[in-house]
Amino acid sequence: MSDIIVGPFNRVEGDLELKLDIQSNQILDAKVTSPMYRGFEQILLGKPPLDALVYTPRICGICSVSQSIACAYALENSQSKTVPHNGRIATNLVLATENILDHLTHFYLFFMPDFAKAEYQSKPWYPTIKNRFQAGKGKALNDILPARADLLKVVALLAGKWPHTLSIQPGGSSKAIDKYEQIELKNTIRQFKLFLEESVFGGSLHTLLEKQTRAELLDWANDNASDFAQFIQLIEVNELEDLGSVDLTLMSYGNYQSAEATAFASGIFHQGKLQPLDADKIKEHTQYSYLNNTCSGKHPLKNTTEMPTALPDEAYSWCKAPRLDGKVIEVGAFARQVIDQQPLIVDLNHHTKSNVANRVIARMIEVARIALLLEQWADEFEIGNPFYQALELPKNFQSEGLIEAARGSLGHWMEVKDGKISNYQIIAPTTWNFSPMDDKKQKGALEQALIGTNAPSSQSVKVEHIVRSFDPCMVCTAH
């Protein structure tokens, strides 16, 4: 048996190490380590609750809006006042813009460049993929980077800046727009939709979303020269549906609020059945984390983050191990679309479960769905009506803010006593997916996805495909 440490990885938004036990070219065991601890949960202690709106976005530069909104929702949920319609729409647009751009950044800059590596140079498709997606040199960069910058105008119009906006507040958005800014907003979204249809998907978004089965998607890709179609054409020849496969409980907090519901449903998918989500059953485990183990197995509102006096011998990560009702959870676009019953992703889950191919497909299907939602929401503003209703926070409260970031379920839990934060707990998407073992020695989602992989060495591109298929954000993971 060969015991190998792999890392640090690039293109994972932070620091990541893997400990792999490899024998006869097969991964027999895997441990996922988040080696960088930062301490935002301790930084917030003793601060006024509104200060969290300044600190939490700085957990991450690429998930900044998501952290802002989770924090704002936690503050907002300390009472039951109604947020103005315009405030909800503005918040949805800003969050959706960040999420759609995160998905495209992952596809073009983090994931697809691995297929342009020398390990694939003997493949007949290699020259085409290398020309389009090679890291730092691929021609796709000339398309995606300007389009990405242009869509960020949505955030500029509605939130002032990105990242680390302060416009998102409990009670809505402090940045109102007029009818001329609404016109600019709609034009920006329309141009971005054209980019998606011309370059990313090679046709109408509605046509793509009409595909309900794996067979229909493959047929669509065979008659299409778009960037997404090129990825679909790689799936079977590289056996990506057999790579990084797991069958875990899927979870979504639901996303994009309105007065009636959320645009993407909340819930869990467990053993073939959709079930309601009971977030009170979330507990964090620290037996295999470097953090103090005295708080293990508790709900975030009853938990604290404490540094150890000495690093425990069996620990191997600064990441906690969150579990829902004792279950290992996978979060992300695949989970969201299964729970929202998107027909194509439901079919893929039915036949091949979660794997490298299906995680990427779900992310790109979500891109198409969000683009249509952006158009819809931009039309729904009631210009002249309020965007924000000021809320007076109680002196003492406990609350939570649950949203879906691009990478999955993001939760902020807050306790305030005498007007000061007495406890603040965060569980980020990659905390779920890249967790170490829990107190029952159940391995996290990535650890399970790696075990059983046929890999000639720890440096195999297969390992990188599996890791990046989850689109990790390591700076959020241990925060």
Image (cartoon, helix red, strand yellow):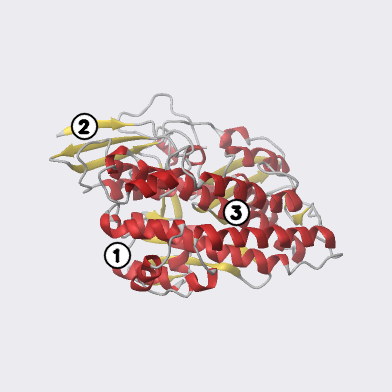
Name the front one of labels 2 and 3: 2
**Kind of residue indicated by mark 1:** Thr
**Kind of residue indicated by mark 2:** Asp
Q: For this rendering, which residue is in front, 201 or 139?
A: 139
**Kind of residue indicated by mark 3:** Glu
* Residue 3: numbered disc: 2
| Side of 132 where 384 appears, left or right | right
| Side of 365 where 255 appears, left or right | right
Q: Can you give x and y, in whole percent of width and height, for residue 303 in the image?
A: 50, 44
* Residue that label 3 marks: 400
Residue drawn at 41 percent across, 31 percent down: 35
Q: Quadrant of residue 319?
A: top left
* Residue 475: numbered disc: none
The correct choice, above or below, for 355 with respect to 18 in the image is below
User: Could you say whether the residue bearing mark 1 is in a helix, strand or loop?
Assistant: helix
User: Could you say whether the residue bearing mark 3 is in a helix, strand or loop?
Assistant: strand
Q: CA distance from mark 1 to mark 3?
A: 34 Å
* Residue that label 1 marks: 352
